[in-house]
Image (cartoon, rainbow, N blue to C red):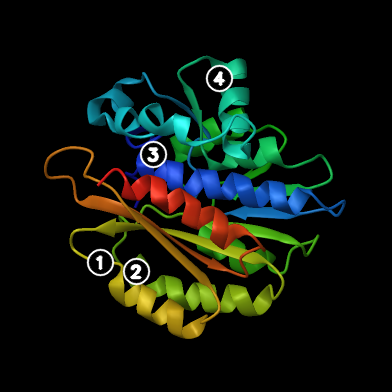
């Protein structure tokens, strides 16, 4: 399915959850003088204008990053990426996860992003000339390149879940990824919906990867009738200190409810 465009949701509370912990992990990885591979299966356009018609239509950024930016210290890696983005692209710009990755990583690291939507892929290539951006199915791309070189690194799996089969097929993909890349951090984002569509997927993932970190936050719907009421991350081989960072973030989200 090629209808999903993240501009309608950029900067929402789920992005705050996902992007702040992603930025923290990337800074953790780059603290060592060893190269890193970063892989993303569903990249989007990487750079978003929060005053675009699509973003204003949903108002999710107003309920998201524009409301909670004060949660983070000025030296938090997420805030550093937000600041770098606005300095380079204007005060209403917001970085997607591929752009955060290029900002937090180094010239010695490798970045490979998949995005199947033609318009989003074109925008992705324009935003990230230094990254490898492929217009391919992200799940297939990951299978084809694991284990990567360098072997140390992180993969973000961030599908739209508009393809309902994703809930059923993702555990099998991740089972193979974790086996093929036995030192990599594998991070799955999923929406928490009023329908609990994610529940069976999480049961399978938890059974397959009992040592993984499952972190969920809840928040009020962005608008009446909106089905997403939370954000989840399932992280295989979480780096040291991530659980504490995630727990601190959860106290902020809990205060919203």
Residue at label 3?
6
- The x and y percentages for residue 176 are 57, 78
Whichever of labels 1 and 2 marks the residue nearer the N terminus, that label is 2
**Which SS class for mark 4?**
helix
Marks 3 and 4, how far apart in space? 19 Å
Label 2 crowd (10 A; few <14 / some 14-19 / many >=20): some
Label of residue 212 in the image: none
Marks 4 and 1, how far apart in space? 36 Å
Label of residue 167 in the image: 2
Residue at label 1?
197
Whichever of labels 3 and 1 marks the residue nearer the N terminus, that label is 3
Nearer-the-camera pick, 181 or 29: 29
Residue at label 4?
86
Callout in the foreground (4, 2): 4
Identify whether 184 is placed above or below 61.
below
Q: Are marks 1 and 2 in contact (CB under 8 Å)?
A: yes
Marks 1 and 2, how far apart in space? 7 Å
Q: Are marks 4 and 1 in contact (CB under 8 Å)?
A: no
Measuring 70% from the left and 46% from the top, which residue is drawn there?
Answer: 27
Q: Are marks 3 and 4 in contact (CB under 8 Å)?
A: no
**Which SS class for mark 1?**
loop
């Amino acid at each position: 399915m090629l209808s999903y465009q993240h501009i309608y949701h950029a900067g929402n509370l789920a992005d705050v959850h996902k992007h702040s912990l992603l930025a923290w992990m990337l800074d953790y990885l780059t603290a060592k003088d060893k190269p890193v591979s970063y892989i993303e299966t569903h990249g989007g356009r990487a750079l978003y204008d929060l005053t675009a018609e699509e973003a204003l239509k949903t108002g999710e950024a107003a309920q998201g990053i524009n409301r909670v930016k004060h949660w983070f210290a000025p030296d938090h890696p997420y805030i550093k990426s937000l600041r770098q983005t606005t300095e380079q692209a204007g005060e209403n710009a917001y970085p997607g996860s591929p752009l955060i990755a290029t900002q937090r990583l180094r010239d010695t690291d490798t970045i490979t992003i998949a995005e199947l939507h033609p318009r989003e892929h074109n925008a992705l290539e324009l935003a990230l000339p230094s990254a490898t951006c492929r217009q391919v199915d992200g799940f297939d791309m990951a299978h084809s390149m694991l284990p990567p070189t360098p072997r140390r690194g992180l993969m973000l799996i961030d599908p739209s879940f508009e393809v309902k089969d994703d809930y059923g097929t993702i555990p099998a993909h991740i089972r193979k990824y974790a086996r093929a890349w036995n030192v990599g951090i594998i991070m799955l984002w999923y929406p928490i919906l009023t329908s609990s569509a994610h529940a069976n997927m999480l049961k399978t993932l938890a059974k397959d990867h009992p040592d993984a970190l499952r972190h969920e936050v809840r928040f009020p719907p962005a608008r009446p009738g909106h089905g997403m009421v939370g954000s989840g991350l399932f992280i295989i081989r979480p780096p040291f200190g991530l659980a504490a960072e995630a727990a601190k973030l959860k106290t902020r989200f809990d205060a919203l409810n």
